[in-house]
Image: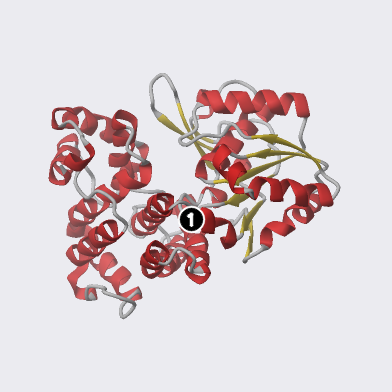
Amino acid sequence: MVPAFDFHLRTRIVFGPGKLSMLGQLARQLGAQRVLVVSDPGIVAAGHTARGLQTLAEAGCTAELFDGARENPTTREVEAGVEVARAFRPDLLVGLGGGSSMDCAKGINFLYTNGGKMQDYWGIGKATKPMLPMIAVPTTAGTGSETQSFALISDPETHVKMACGDKKASCAVALLDPELTLTQPARVTALAGIDAIAHAVETAVTKPRTAMSLLFSHEAWRLLAPNFPRVVTEPNDIEARASMQLGASLAGIAIENSMLGAAHALANPLTARFDIPHGQAVGLMLPHVVRFNGAVVNQDYSHLLARIEGRGDVPPPDSGAEGLAQFLSRLLELAGLASRLSELNVDSDLLPACAEDAAKQWTGTFNPRPLSVEDFLNLYRSAW
């Protein structure tokens, strides 16, 4: 029997090269007059933020810039942005940048409209008041934050990454312009792309997956897996960039409807304890999780391989979990990313503590094969 589901696509997706020019028009369609743009110094330096502000001005919007977003945003950046919002009084937010800028904008939205502190919204559905509409303009192809209702905000004291989710935080519009991704540094392209691929792989096998979520998981995988090698080796290939950006957004929709799995549960402690970038951490752990999960979802992994059969050096579908794990490991190597924890100076003596942390991660509860603390530890050891 097909599992029951409740599906509602809350975000309008506007996609295509040059679509940043529509930002002002889209803002006015949402009735906005005062727009707070949340971005980061790197995106400002690349010139994308100025172009966004220009199109807002041309549409008659008054805009204010908060460029204090940082990688893995913390409550400090969110609170700084809220101060700017309180002084400016926006009626629309724009998150223009990578996942960090979009998450920071969502965090600002929570606190500006509902008050309190970010910790109050850790979990799902904690906002009691309406939130401002938001337009997300991703400049990377990775997190899929633009199509999710979650803000990932770190606590600077505990280093815990808090997933704060509420359907009211869903973006009104995701404006996807692949031209904005051309300025990504090679390492950012690699890290973001591997993260997006991990989203497609994990959402395809999680326990809450549905017939609807699988449509997005599978199409995201079909777009991402063959095009990742292209953007790594031919960074100016706009067609490949477009496929990656759209694939990342579709994977975000899949996450919204099926959640993630053990690879993300394992990655978060590595980022918190050793400051390993998220894409590197999740990409490194993913092949090991695929092998672990193969005992229960091997056929699902075969289906993924079948969807890209003939598009490059792809293992045969009947190789299942092992073939998929080998394919994912080759992508890491192609991108110049580490494939062993020992390469990243991870202290093996701290792996038991990491396993304890991983077992507390919410995403692990959706993994198709249940894990104990010992399972998490064995996965870390296999990756070390």
Asked if residue 326 lies left or right of residue 253, the reply is left
Question: Which residue occupies 31% across, 76% down?
Answer: 312
Question: Which residue occupies 56% across, 62% down?
Answer: 178
Asked if residue 111 lies left or right of residue 209, the reply is right
| Residue picked out by circle 1 | 141
Q: In which quadrant of the rendered view does residue 193 lie?
A: bottom left
Quarter holding the C terminus is top left
Q: How is the image coloured?
A: secondary structure
Asked if residue 255 lies left or right of residue 336, the reply is right
Q: In which quadrant of the rendered view does residue 68 lie?
A: top right
Vertical order, 251 against 39 (above or below): below
Q: In which quadrant of the rendered view does residue 95 lie?
A: top right
Question: Which residue occupies 26% across, 70% down?
Answer: 302
> Which sits in the foreground, 277 or 289?
277
Residue 47: x and y in percent read 64, 48
Residue 228: x and y in percent read 39, 64
Mark 1 element type: loop
From where the camera sits, is residue 353 visible? yes
Asked if residue 264 lies left or right of residue 211, the reply is left
Vertical order, 48 against 69 (above or below): below
Q: How many marks?
A: 1
Quarter holding the N terminus is bottom left
Q: Sort mark 1 into few (<14), some (14-19) or many (20+) by Cα contacts within 10 Å.
A: many
> Which sits in the foreground, 169 or 323?
323
Residue 157: x and y in percent read 41, 19
Residue 365: x and y in percent read 32, 42
Task: Residue type at mark 1: give it.
Answer: Ala
From where the camera sits, is residue 127 visible? no
| Residue found farthest to the right | 60
